[in-house]
Image: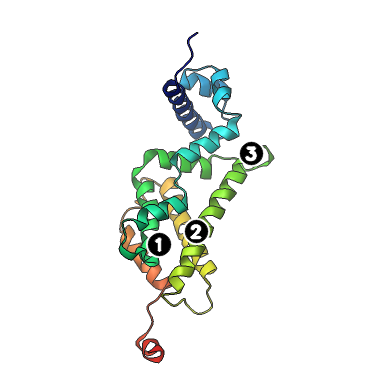
């Protein structure tokens, strides 16, 4: 049997990931079968094990190919925002998430699998670790940029940059939940920019004229 080229091997890997995505979406991660994934991808089980150690590795690879690390997203957006103003960057990062949720079918499928089709118990500890890592990375990025915004805007009394990051996380998690659970009735993109601006203006209010006069 002729050896596969690198391009053919990568294509096989993508077919397997597509098949795993369909299988896990239909049956959930816990009940997904490597045999059925192989049948869907028209490969042998050995081919799956050549590319992936186990089902958890398949899930991680599915997430990796649709996930953009927050640090990379920020760097990409910074190149298109004059001065890279932190509040504008934060808004654009949130809008990017909304836009992907609204228009990227693969992203929606993988998010649905991770959020709703992973049975988080001892047998799915790897899925739990994956979710925790995604949460920690996102929260750390939001805390960092919230501190930067707080240097330019005041925070509501009693709230810290960490509190602000948690509120933004809760808002975005709610958007994902509503859109993925109720796609026919909840249009996540409807009024997205106006809503996000209203949220951020509430979390990072402009100083009042009295505060401005006192500081000057």
First-in-chain label (2 vs 3): 3
Secondary structure type for disc 1: helix
Q: Which residue is mark 2?
A: 141
**Residue 23 screen position, x and y as percent:** 50, 29
Q: Is residue 190 above or below residue 46?
A: below
Looking at the picture, tell me which residue is in the foreground, 112 or 43.
Answer: 43
Task: Answer with the quarter of the image where residue 50 lies.
Answer: top right
Which residue is at a point 43% across and 50% down the rendered structure image?
72
Q: Residues within 10 Å of mark 1 (few under 14, many from 20)?
A: many
The residue at 33%/53% (across/down) is 189
Q: Which mark sits nearer the N-terminus, 3 or 1?
A: 1
Tell me the residue at 45%/56% (across/down).
172
User: Which quarter shows the C terminus?
Assistant: bottom left
Rendered location of residue 55, percent (x, y) = 59, 31
Left or right: 185 as drawn, with respect to 19: left
93 left or right, relative to 137: left
Whether residue 28 is visible to the viewer of this picture, yes or no, is: no
Return the residue nearer the eye: 155 or 105.
Answer: 155
Q: Is residue 112 above or below residue 151?
A: above
Total numbered badges shown on the rendered structure: 3
Q: Which residue is mark 3?
A: 124
């Amino acid at each position: 049997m002729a050896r596969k080229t690198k391009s053919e091997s990568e294509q096989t890997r993508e077919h397997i990931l597509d098949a795993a995505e369909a299988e896990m979406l239909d049956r959930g991660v816990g009940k997904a079968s490597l045999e059925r994934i192989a049948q869907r991808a028209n490969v042998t089980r050995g081919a799956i094990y050549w590319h992936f150690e186990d089902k958890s590795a398949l899930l991680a690879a599915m997430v990796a190919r649709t996930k953009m690390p927050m640090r990379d997203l920020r760097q990409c957006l910074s190149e298109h925002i004059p001065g890279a103003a932190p509040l504008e960057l934060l808004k654009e990062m949130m809008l990017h998430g909304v836009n992907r949720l609204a228009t990227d079918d693969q992203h929606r499928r993988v998010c649905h699998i991770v959020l709703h089709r992973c049975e988080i118990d001892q047998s799915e500890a790897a899925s739990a670790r994956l979710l925790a890592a995604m949460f920690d990375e996102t929260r750390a990025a939001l805390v960092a940029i919230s501190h930067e915004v707080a240097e330019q805007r005041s925070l509501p009394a009693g709230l810290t940059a960490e509190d602000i990051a948690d509120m933004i996380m809760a808002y975005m998690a709610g958007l994902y939940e509503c859109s993925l659970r109720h796609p026919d009735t909840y249009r996540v993109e409807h009024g997205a920019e106006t809503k996000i601006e209203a949220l951020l203006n509430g979390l990072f209010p402009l100083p009042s004229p009295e505060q401005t006069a006192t500081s000057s």
